[in-house]
Image: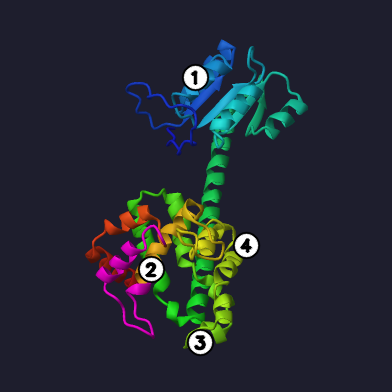
Amino acid sequence: MIRTRSNGPSLSLPQLPAPEGETSSRIRVLVVDDDELVRETFMAILTEEGYDVSCADSAAQALAFLSRRTFDVMLSDICMPAQNGLELLDATLASYPDMPVILITAYGNVNIARDALYRGASDFISKPCNLAELPIIVERNLTRQAVQRKNALRHNLALQNSDETVLDALLSALNTRDTETEGHSERVTAYTIEMADLMQIPAREMYHIERGALLHDIGKIGIPDRILLKPGKLTDEEWSEMRRHPIIGYEMCSRIDMLKTAARIVLHHHEAWQGNGYPHALSGDEIPLGARIFAVADTLDAMTSDRPYRCAMSFSEARAEIIRQSGKQFDPEIVKVFLSVPDTRWRQVRLLAQGSK
């Protein structure tokens, strides 16, 4: 029976090219034992069962193999000269944390077995073993690994779905609380991502920037209606209260694991390059990069959107204002990125963001 090879574990060992002509899709097994007869016997049995088997006579040779090829499972003797199987186990799992490692010894000692399993071995067998059971043991460990991977995938998908549910709930609460912000979060996020993408920001960091942009105003949920919904100009006291919304938003988001990094953008989205922003009057590179990008995007949307007290400006007018504030309110380098995008593209991004609502 030929078994289809599963996805191999991730490697951090240096990768050398696979042996020339290597095209096997069979499950790869590495047998490590200083006894040649054991190696040959195990190889014959497992090859007959359809596995692609390699053999090493020492821990050092095994590690050399692991630096060249991806293996799906390893069987290793414990008692070997120079470096024993437990030491090989530690070195292997440091780079192949998900690979099943089955340890073998001629000394059936419960304490050795307990230590091996504690250190991460997936199974433990004694020799002389029942050779007919060898393929069953290998198959059992591969099946267990496949189930663990499947469960991990389901868990990650469930977490992602849960995260998106939390995000949707927060945005819905904000839009219900402050109708003036409806659509603003989506547009300003689209502008932010457009610039971040041009800056080639890594996907992992982009994830947090996107969520920080979406939730930048979430702290307004904690602002009283008499201030948040006031149609006229705010008094100094009311304005002081309104300026607390980044701190309120930060306190909300930082309590949610998946939003802890994004919370820094929420906290600092009103900081200014010259240090005259709020709440902490940060300046220059003290301001998180995501918040610096967001500041330009926020101003762009604010100026190109209708407000009760004025009509929307054109994109060219907004562009001129952003240029004027370069080095004052905005990071000059991010302004350069903004200016590299034509007005026609910004209008397209706006329309796409509005269509995503």
Q: Is residue 181 magenta?
A: no
Q: Which residue is mark 4?
A: 255
Task: Kindly state the secondary structure of the residue where label 4 is placed.
Answer: loop
Q: CA distance from mark 3 to mark 1?
A: 71 Å
What residue lies at 52% left-to-right and 76% top-to-bottom?
173
Decide if residue 117 is in sight here: yes
Q: Start and end of the magenta stretch? A: 302-328
Contact (Cβ within 8 Å) of mark 3 with mark 1: no
Whole-Å distance between the Cαs marked 4 and 3? Answer: 30 Å
Amino acid on which disc 4 is placed: Arg
Camera-side mark, 4 or 3: 3
Mark 3 surroundings within 10 Å by alpha-carbon count, few (fewer than 14), some (14 through 19), many (20 or more):
few
Q: Is residue 40 above or below residue 353?
A: above
> Does label 2 or label 4 sit earlier along the sequence?
4
Secondary structure category for the residue under label 2 = helix
Q: Secondary structure at mark 3?
A: loop
Q: Position of residue 102 (x, y in %)?
A: 61, 29
User: Disc 4 or 1, which lies upstream in sequence?
Assistant: 1
Residue type pointed to by label 2: Thr
For marks 2 and 3, give the CA distance. 22 Å
Residue sitting at x 38%, y 85%:
309
Q: Which mark is residue 299?
A: 2
